[in-house]
Image (spheres, grey):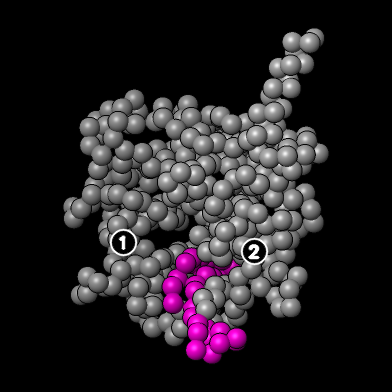
Amino acid sequence: MKKIGLILLSVIFLVYGYLGYDTVRTYMQYDVTVKTSARLSDIAGKVVSVPLETPGNGVIRQIRRVQADGDCLFMLSDQRLLQFDFSGKFIRQLTASAHDSEVFIADYTLDTDRRLVVIIDSQRNCHNYDYYGNLLSTSRLEQPWRKLTAFAYHNRTFWVTAEKLVKSRENPDEFQIIHSLYQLDANMHEIASQRLHVADVGRNRVFESYHADELLADDYGVYAYASPGNMDYLLHDTLYITHRQEIPLLHTGGHFGSACIYPVRKGKRYQIATNHQAIDDHYSFFYDRIDHTAYCLSKGFKDDLHKTGYVADLQPMDIHNHSYCYLKSGAELSKKFPDRAKNNDSPVLFIVTLKT
């Protein structure tokens, strides 16, 4: 018994050092299991592989913002918008400008009601394509945005987070950056806007900036997700969000309402956060609301389904966080796709449907 007690005590001290005293106290309150290693099958209900055909005008690298509608699969790669079908066959490339190579795609979204690909370019022009690659219209956005940070379509309207410069109230000769959420109609005219504000998660320790990485939605409305700079208090803050009364879309704690930024992507079962851009602070965080299990992973999930090593950077494919994806290339494909393992420019997209 004494030996078992010493082992348990050692484990407790290790966990205290990893998560901090406050977080440990919080997850003990909710009887949460914390895991620092996990398999992909622990969270994935289904994983589909899509071997991507190489476009005739260049290789596929740095894929992000993967979205799908029906049999159409879209993704950004090196400032190009590529379209595939679900077999991986390359269909076409959409560009921001056919005449000016210095104009690039800032972001895009799918209008699934009208089956349109809506592109915003670096010059604040909006281009509407149909799913067959036909350019239907181009219009100029009149909003005085300094930088577009996220773009989404939800509930028959468009949503944008963007930075703009405004004069400082204290010193009219100085400017400050304001980050806001904008709601736009089908013609990209502004309906409403709200300044972005960090959601009330108790101490807000995980937030280091107001930068929004993604626009997502839950049953209560649209919200922004910002990748936390570290995960020391991420479990604590996630439990605060999960177990308190539902936090509304608009933050009303201040003198005026403002749209919320959250440290997690809020799914039906999983609350998710990832950071794989930083050099020294990579992590994958999943909190399972059904099993009350927190996955705090520095290497990601071990791919026990397709044997591609570790899956660290799961990216959402839809605004409600139902599907995620990850990309693999080169030697990591040696067991599942040996013919592609010799070429780093022949990637495979893996689409993950999370457990419900």
Between 171 and 120, which is closer to the camera in this rendering?
171
Q: Which residue is mark 1?
A: 79
Between 33 and 72, which is closer to the camera in this rendering?
33
In-image side of 334 versus 167 (left or right): left
The residue type indicated by label 1 comes to: Gln
Total marks in image: 2
Residue 170 falls inside the magenta stretch? yes
Q: Secondary structure at mark 2?
A: strand
In-image side of 288 versus 150 (left or right): right
Q: Residue at x 69, y 50 (%)?
A: 237
Relative vertical location of residue 310 with respect to residue 67 in this rendering, above or below: above
Please provide percent x and percent y for residue 337: 31, 30
First-in-chain label (1 vs 2): 1
Q: Residue at x 18, y 55 (%)?
A: 57
Q: Residue at x 32, y 55 (%)?
A: 77
Q: Which residue is mark 2?
A: 198
Determine the image quadrant of residue 199: bottom right
Q: Which residues are magenta?
A: 146-175
Q: Point out the image quarter for the C terminus.
A: top right
Please provide percent x and percent y for residue 303: 46, 30
Q: Secondary structure at mark 1?
A: loop
Residue 352 can be seen, yes or no: yes
In-image side of 27 versus 340 (left or right): right
Task: State how far apart marks 1 and 2 are (Cα).
Answer: 30 Å
Between 257 and 81, which is closer to the camera in this rendering?
257
Instruction: Count residues near mark 1 (Cα–Cα under 10 Å), then give few for <14, some for 14-19, many for 20+.
Output: some
Instruction: Count residues near mark 2 (Cα–Cα under 10 Å), then give few for <14, some for 14-19, many for 20+.
Output: many
Most frequent secondary structure within the magenta stretch? strand
Relative vertical location of residue 125 with respect to residue 153 in this rendering, above or below: below
Q: Residue furthest left?
A: 56
The residue type indicated by label 2 comes to: Val
